[in-house]
Image (cartoon, helix red, strand yellow):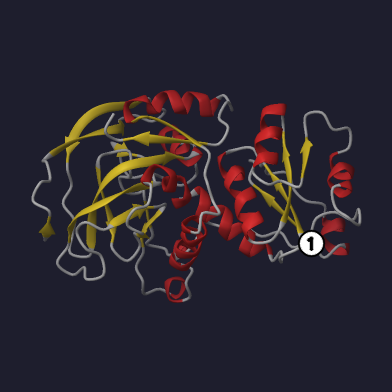
């Protein structure tokens, strides 16, 4: 194992010790990377709603046995690499995302659908994640971050950014067309609006409240529809398009499991498609938009020890944009 020689044996982390939380701020051992892994000194980590689900244990997908360190939007510096790692060097900037590793051999991995791998490792869920000062990732899957990048601002791109970019790609919408973004004022939506604009799409933001309206319009939405005050949501969204026929695609970022009308789905040739994070190429492309200065995630920084406060605001629906934790505080 190659290392920088100054790696401590202990580190601060936020640890889920029991289902439902809260997280416990405590010292734990620093892990050592395996032959195909890298150890990253995580400096900043974005906070995703999935992290709250991991702590609450309310998803149908089991986490690793507790204790668990959550987090999957971590950006930092590579401080150690396994003996089989050749294309990542100590001192490189790198990020850990939701997909921590995959088998690289199954049919899904060979077709660039590695998030669907049956042996996928999920940061902060099936393996310990980024709410710690040092975290491990498979070298093949860590995000390559250019030197000089502001790590606190790129952290949210590593999940939220990749996820919405992939969703817009999967929608099939082309430059010049309209896409409605449901939940546009949230952490995912704030990035989706910017990716839509960077891809040449006109975004119709759908969310609730004046604060989110202002945020959405500042981030490039061509129109805003407030679902809490509108008398006819569908009509208002249609009116936001030049021909009045409605958007070419809808990106649903809000939690909803209401079924779609079979009749409308058939007669209007609607395609309903799920999009699950992104592969390695999607990651590189999403980061390219950021590196070109086209994506700026609105975020607030708090110390790692304040993570439970962020979860409380998240539970109450009080977060606009994204929160990023500083692992040194």
Residue 209: name its quadrant: top right
Q: Nearer the viewer, residue 225 or 36?
A: 225
Q: Nearer the viewer, residue 200 or 27?
A: 200
Tell whether 86 sits left or right of 220: left
Residue 206 drawn at (x, y percent) = 73, 41
- In the rendered image of this protein, does residue 103 appear above or below residue 16? below
- In the rendered image of this protein, does residue 241 appear above or below residue 270? above
Q: Quadrant of the C terminus?
A: top left
Q: Quadrant of the N terminus?
A: bottom left
- Residue found 51% across the figure and 54% down from its top: 293
Residue 13 drawn at (x, y percent) = 26, 34
Q: Does the image show residue 285? A: yes
- Residue found 63% across the figure and 45% down from its top: 253
- Residue found 89% across the figure and 47% down from its top: 239
Q: Does the image show residue 124? A: no
Count of residue discs: 1
Which residue is at the far left? 5
Mark 1: give few (<14), some (14-19) or many (20+) Cα within 10 Å. Answer: few
* SS at badge 1: loop
Residue 257 drawn at (x, y percent) = 68, 44
Pointer 1: what residue?
270
Q: Nearer the viewer, residue 309 or 211?
A: 211
Residue 268 drawn at (x, y percent) = 86, 62
């Amino acid at each position: 194992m190659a290392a920088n020689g100054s790696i401590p044996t202990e580190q601060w982390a936020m640890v889920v010790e029991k289902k439902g939380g809260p997280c416990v701020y405590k010292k734990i051992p620093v892990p050592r990377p395996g032959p195909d892994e890298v150890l990253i000194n995580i400096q900043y980590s974005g906070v995703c709603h999935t992290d709250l689900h991991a702590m609450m244990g309310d998803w149908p997908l089991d986490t690793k046995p507790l204790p668990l360190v959550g987090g999957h939007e971590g950006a930092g510096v590579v401080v150690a690499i396994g003996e089989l790692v050749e294309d990542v060097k100590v001192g490189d900037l790198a990020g850990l995302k939701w997909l921590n590793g995959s088998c690289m051999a199954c049919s899904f991995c060979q077709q660039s659908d590695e998030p669907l791998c049956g042996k996928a490792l999920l940061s902060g869920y099936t393996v310990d994640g980024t709410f710690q000062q040092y975290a491990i990732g498979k070298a093949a899957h860590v995000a390559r971050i250019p030197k000089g990048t502001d790590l606190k601002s790129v952290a949210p791109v590593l999940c939220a950014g990749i996820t919405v970019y992939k969703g817009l790609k999967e929608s099939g919408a082309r430059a010049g067309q309209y896409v409605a973004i449901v939940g546009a004022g949230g952490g995912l939506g704030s990035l989706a609006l910017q990716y839509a604009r960077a891809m040449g799409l006109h975004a119709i933001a759908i969310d609730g409240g004046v604060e989110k309206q202002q945020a959405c319009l500042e981030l490039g939405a061509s129109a805003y529809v407030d679902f809490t005050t509108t008398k006819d949501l569908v009509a208002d969204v249609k009116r936001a398009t030049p021909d009045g026929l409605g958007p070419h695609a809808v990106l649903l970022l809000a939690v909803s499991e209401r079924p779609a009308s079979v009749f409308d789905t058939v007669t209007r040739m609607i395609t309903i498609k799920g999009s699950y994070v992104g592969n390695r190429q999607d990651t590189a492309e999403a980061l390219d938009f950021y590196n070109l200065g086209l994506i700026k995630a609105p975020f607030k920084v708090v110390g790692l020890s304040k993570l439970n406060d962020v979860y409380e605001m998240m539970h109450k629906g009080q977060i606009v944009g994204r929160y990023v934790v500083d692992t040194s505080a």
